[in-house]
Structures are given as C-alpha cells and as structure tokens.
Image (cartoon, rainbow, N blue to C red):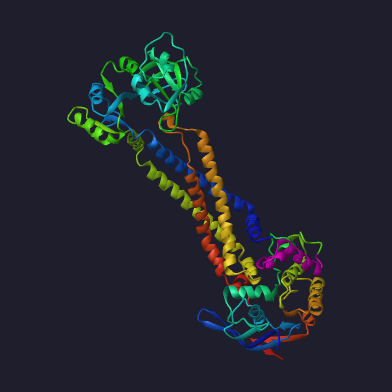
Amino acid sequence: MGTVQIRNLRKVYRREAQEVPVLDGLSIDIAEGDFVALMGPSGSGKTTLLNLIGGIDQPTSGEVSVAGTDIARMKGGALARWRSRNIGFIFQLYNLIPVLTALQNVELPLLLVKMSGKERRRRAQTALELVGLGDRLKHYPRQLSGGQEQRVAIARALVSDPTVLLADEPTGDLDRKSGGEILDLLERLNKEFKKTIVMVTHDPHAAERAHRVLHLDKGVLSA
Amino acid sequence: MNLLSLVLVNLGRNKRRTVLTLMSVAVALFLFCALGGVLDTLKDAVQFGSESRLATRNAISLVFPIPLAYREKIAAVPGIKRIAVQNWFGGRDPADPHKFFAQFAVDPENFFPMYKNELTIVDASPPQAQIALPAELDPKLAAFMSEQTACVVSEPLMKKMGWKLGQTITLAGTIYPGPWPFTIRAVYRAIGQAFGGDALFFHFRYLEQKGMGGQGQAGVYKLELSDPGRAADIAKQVDAMFLNSSAATHTETERAFAAGFVSMYGNIPFVLRVIGLAVVFAILLVAANTMVMAVRERTAEMGVLKTLGFGDGTVFGVVLAEAATITLGGGLLGSLLAKLSIDASHFNGGGALPPMTVHWSTVWVGIAVAFTIGAVSGLIPAWQASRLRIVDALRRVD
C-alpha cells in the first residue's frame, strides 16, 4: 500500500455550459520514499493531479488517499489542517511573501502549530541551513537569486516535516546551473530524509532524477 | 513572528497607502468627535443653572424685556425667598472686539447672595469707606457695592483680557450704545459648572439710569425658592399673575431656561449628527476601497497561505485585523486629538456656554465607530479572501 493511492480519479472543469475533462479515471500508487516525475504536454492534467494530491482542489469523483487519509471528501478547516501537516508545496515561481525575510517565510507554516516563537525560529533556521541558506536568514526575497528563492521555498515546504513534497516545475524558472542545484537538493531530501516527492516537470533532464516517470496525456496515463 | 506581526508586516508593504488611509480615518474621527464635542457642550449647557431656582422672562421671547414693576409682585408670591434682576448687556471691548464675553447687569444685593454657593470672590479692592452691606453679601464686595460703575469679573476673563484689579475698562455698548466705563472692584471664581465662569457683572441701577433712561424694564428675573419641590406650582402662579397683561411672562427652572437658550441655536444637534455620520460613511467607503485593493493585489499570496494550511477563518481574521488596525489607529489618533485640542481650547462662546469639551464617552464612541469602520470595510475583502479557491488564487491550471 502506497503513501499516495489514487483510484478512478476524475476531474472535470466547467467552462460556461461546457464540461472539460482534465483527468479521466486515473489510478496511481506512490510508495513512501518514492520520487515520481509527472510529465506530459500542457493541458494534460499534471498540475491538476498535483493539486488533487495536495488537497487544494476537489476531484469530481474517485479517491485520493494520502498517508491513509481519504482527502477527496475532506473540506474546509479539516482539509487545511491536514494539508499543513502532510503536504509541502514547491511552486515554479517560488511564491515567497516579498515583505517577509527568508526566515519569516519559512516560519509561516509553523504559525499554525502550537509552539514557542523560539522553537519556531530554531526549526526555520535548521530548514534554511539544510538547503544551504544558513547565512541568508535576514534576506528578503528581492535580495536573493532565483535559485536561492527556490531553496527558501523548499525550506518552507520542509519545515513542518510533511509526508509528501509536491513540486510544480521547481526548475522551470531557473537557469541550468541553479536548476541542477535544486534537483540535487530534492534528490538529497529523497535519499537522505526519505521524503516522498511528486514533481511536475517538462524537463527530461529533471525527470531523470526521479525514480520513475509518469506520462500524462489528455488526463490518462500513457506508456 | 506571529499572526499579529504578519498583519503589521502586511500593513507596512505599502506604507504611503496605509498612512494616508490611517490619516483619513483620523481626520474623519477628529471631525466626528469635534462635532460630538459641540453636542456634549450643548448638553452641558442644559445642565447650566439649577433646578431649585426659577427664571422669569417675557413669554414672547427672551429678547423682549419685562416690567421692573413685576419684581415686587413676584417677590410676594409665597415660596419665593429672593428675587434678583439679570439683564444682558452685550458690550464689546473696542480694543479687541472679537473677544466676546458675557456681561450682565444685576442687582447685587440679591444676585450675589442667591449664587453664594456657586461663586467665590477671590480678590477685591479695599473699600473706600465703611458701608452697611446686606447680611448675606460677601464683605469682600464692599468696594464694588459703594461704586455705581464698579464691576465683578471672573478670574479666567481677567486673564484672557489681561485686566488688573482696580483697572477702569471701557466697553462699547451694542444694545445700549455709547462708551461704558467700568472699574474692576472684585474678581470671582465659579464653583462647578452651574454658574458661568467667564462673565462680567455690574450694577443694574447703572444700566437702568445710563442706558435705559428709566423705562422701568428688566431682562430676566431669577427666583430663589424656599421650597424647590414647589417649583412647578410657583412658576404657574407667577405666570398666571401676568397672563392678561401687555407683557405676559414665562417662568421655568433655571436649567430649563438654559436649555431654551441652547434651543435658540435651532436644530444644530440634528445637523451635526447628520454631518458626523456623513463623514464617517464617506471614510467607510474609502477604507473599504483601500482594503479591497490591498487584498486584490495579494490574491496569489492568499492562495499560497491557504496552500500552506491557513484556513479560511485565519485568512479572514488576518484581512479583518489589517482593516481594524488601520481604522483603530486612525480612530484613536483622531478621537484623542479632538479630546485634547478641544478641551485645551477652553472655548466657551464668550461665557454663553460652559467651556467646550469632548466627553470621554464621545471619545469611546469615536473609537467604537473607528472599529466598526474597520470591521465593515474589512468584511467584504476578508470574506472574498476567505472564500478564494486556492487554484483560482494561484491562477494556474495545467
């Protein structure tokens, strides 16, 4: 039984009167400690699948179970609390809060957990040191390079020790060198810290770092 | 960092907009509390005077006199302990005509004993000769009593006008034209608010002889009662005596008389309330617009916060707290500034009103209004932010 179990997953978007199927009866198992790359052309449903695993979108039908919890029917506050404990998101455009320092950005998910400010700072600092930014704690996003911003975003995703890391084209906005460093970091998190990672990418070189690659096309898995 | 610092950091991201919004709320609340202060002062004016004294005036209007001959008839009504004449003078200091203050011609042998509990003589010229004074009159008024052109001036007015005891001042009469010299022979201090703390009193006989040409008229009679519980009966009795005369009277408690004086301002309280509410409503729209813009600019960030696990309620609270912080800050600033500046002005309409003040209750209402502005202006953007779907906020469907 995998950390992520997806069964007969369907997602249909409505655009005015039209129904647009994005995922069509998808079933996937992702084991604990796995590193999966999702590839496919634009509109194939990669990000939608990622969003459904992360509980930030609701399926039209089917099951999505993460770490033994069926999240397909969870809603509102319960889903938000579950997300804060189990999911770490990494976005293509980093999505850091520009008015917060690197340390404060990483502290954000911990604001939802009962702990002292000191402990929160300690954990955030540890996460930033882990991604190699121990000397950039007080820097604002505008004072960091793209690669460093993405490292802060990874630290933010890691800091609450989630079950699964979901990365949506984490190297899509970076040059080859910085992108390579980010992939090294993800690989390390997977190998050393046994983090389960699901990564959407268009880049075959990035996908090579994953244990396995799933190809999506028109909402179904292709060979 | 905590949620409060997140709120403060968000407010600091566009400092100019935050400061301008805060200032606009502060100005609105300053106006709201200042207008409230006018209402407070008018309310205080209604408290001017006593329930145990009556005032008799011409039934048509305060501006018409009543015959001096009524004095003896009124004094004879059972239950009236003492009757005093009080006549508005309406003079101006030619050296400084804009400094308005109240002047009254009174018969001191009755007037000052009647108000002995409401004023105290703090300074007086020594008498030139020994004269017999009425039993209840303060002996310090001896010099004033022995000189027809003498006057008694309040302590604050002495300070305001820069006058000295013993100085002769000349006022220009507006109702009773001509130069009117007065020599300051005593200085009084009002005790409490029931008595005007900013006025000049002089002998009625001086006004009667020099200004009225012996017409035998008086402005108002003040009646001290031996039994305040019979005030209503006595008032009816007094008015009944002159009902069919050429100058019918209207007698009421001194407090009601003061309230009537205030009502001469027309429906100012209503107008002030409407203006105050209009200002508050305008600022509500400004604050709401600011918050909607602030949240719209951060739609993606709201999506990120929700992705990280911030619930709808937390996002709602953060946005609402931002709005409330701006408006509460502005409200506190404006309300307290109104309280401090208006109280410090000591403006009293030249003695016609008690010193202008903003009651603390008005300040609290102002702060509550500011909080309400924050809550209402933040409600829509906070609700929008809380209802935002993460995938829409992130705007990316692949």
Inspect the magenta stretch and tell me whether residue A26 lies in it. no
Q: Nearer the viewer, residue B204 or B391?
A: B204
Q: Main secondary structure of the magenta part?
A: helix
Q: Is residue B73 above or below residue A221?
A: above
Residue at the image point whose x is 68% and y is 63% from the top: A97
Across and down, in percent, residue A88 comes to 70, 74
Across and down, in percent, residue B25 comes to 53, 49
Image quadrant where residue A192 sits:
bottom right
Residue at the image point whose x is 71% and y is 65% from the top: A107
Q: Is residue A28 visible?
A: yes
Inspect the magenta stretch and tell me whether residue A124 lies in it. yes
Q: Nearer the viewer, residue B116 or B217?
A: B116
Q: Nearer the viewer, residue B75 or B25?
A: B75
Is B110 on the left-hand or right-hand side of B38? Answer: left
Pick out the residue farthest to the top: B129
The stretch in magenta equals A105-133
Across and down, in percent, residue B80 comes to 27, 28
Is B38 on the left-hand or right-hand side of A197? Answer: left
Is A68 on the left-hand or right-hand side of B285? Answer: right
Q: Nearer the viewer, residue A70 or B361?
A: B361
The quadrant of the rendering that contains the C terminus of chain B is bottom right
Q: Is residue B12 above or below residue B198?
A: below
Across and down, in percent, residue B222 comes to 31, 27
Image quadrant where residue A144 sits:
bottom right
